[in-house]
Amino acid sequence: MSKESTNHEYKISVLLPTRGRSEALTRSLKSLFELASDTSSIELLLGFDNDDKKGLESFQEITQPWLDSQDISYTVMSFEPLGYSRLNEYVNTLASTSDSDWLIFWNDDAVMETENWDGIISSYTGQFKLLAFHTHNDHPYSIFPIVPRAWLDTLGYLSPHQLSDGWLSQQAYLLDIWERIPVNVTHDRYDLTGNNLDDTFKNRVMFEGNHTDPRDFHNKKQIDLRYQDCDRLAEYMKQQGLNTSWWENVKNNKQDPWEKLKLVDVNKQMMQYNIDHTGSKK
């Protein structure tokens, strides 16, 4: 089995769009870097809306001095406000400037709990897999997706849809490359912990639950695009000498694509996986 080549400046890039969360952002970043084994191998890519005066001022006064004192490599990008409905566009743009083996989707309300998390991720370098942290109730999606650089290089983006965690996780199950790693993360989101009830949370728009909307995660247009991108990822896998028989069997209706998703859905959090390729419930 061949492995993808790596020749990047960093081992890990942390992709973090943020808005209006001063204390939460600082707490999140400190949890990441204080528990990392090698901060010099990590680059931080932050995205701020250009009208987020509160967030930018707090970053400059509190967070940035701390990052500088720890000699952490970081880049700050300014965006015209895109909103939660276009969250994936922030992440795709941040990823396009990265230079690392692994890309992590991170949130300003996420808190790292495991020492040497970066070393654990790096131990998978050379493998083409979507990695998943242990998060709230062990959701069967990778809530904070961890992807190899080749994912971005192959498609030209990480996710074309707002719900990036579901998008990439479903692709990983379709290709049989999803894997949980022994790293724990707390998602300190209001509906999970009761914390961070702010405008950022209140103003979330979710394109899920109405499959007649062409923007909806389960609309046939979106499902078709996920399948098309899986074909492109599978072609890359074949070039690397990796087994794509699971995906071929899925396409030939010989394999339940969500078999392994159901096995890891220990708390029965997912109902959406019972959707076929047409977007109709089975």
Image: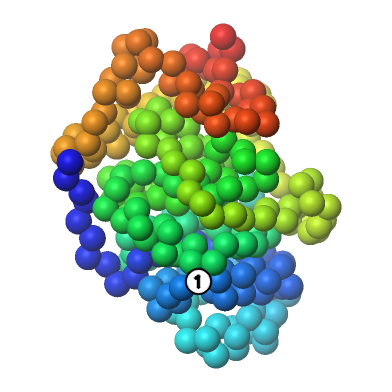
Q: Position of residue 111 (x, y in %)?
A: 65, 62
Quarter of the view holding residue 2:
top left
Amino acid carrying label 1: it is: Ala
Can residue 78 be seen here? The reply is no
Q: Nearer the viewer, residue 39 or 200?
A: 39
Q: Residue at x 47, y 26 (%)?
A: 260
Residue 145 percent location from the top left of the image: 49, 48
Left/right of residue 138 with respect to residue 100 in the rendered view: right
Mark 1 — residue? 36
Q: Quadrant of the C terminus?
A: top right
Label 1 SS: loop
Residue 279 as seen in the image, left or right of residue 175: right
Please give the name of the residue rendered at 63% of the width and 35% of the height, measured from the top-left corner.
207
User: Which picture quadrant has residue 154?
Assistant: top left
Image point (61%, 38%), residue name: 139
> Number of labelled discs?
1
Q: Quick check: can you spot residue 40?
A: yes
**10 Å crowding of disc 1: few (<14), some (14-19), many (20+):** many
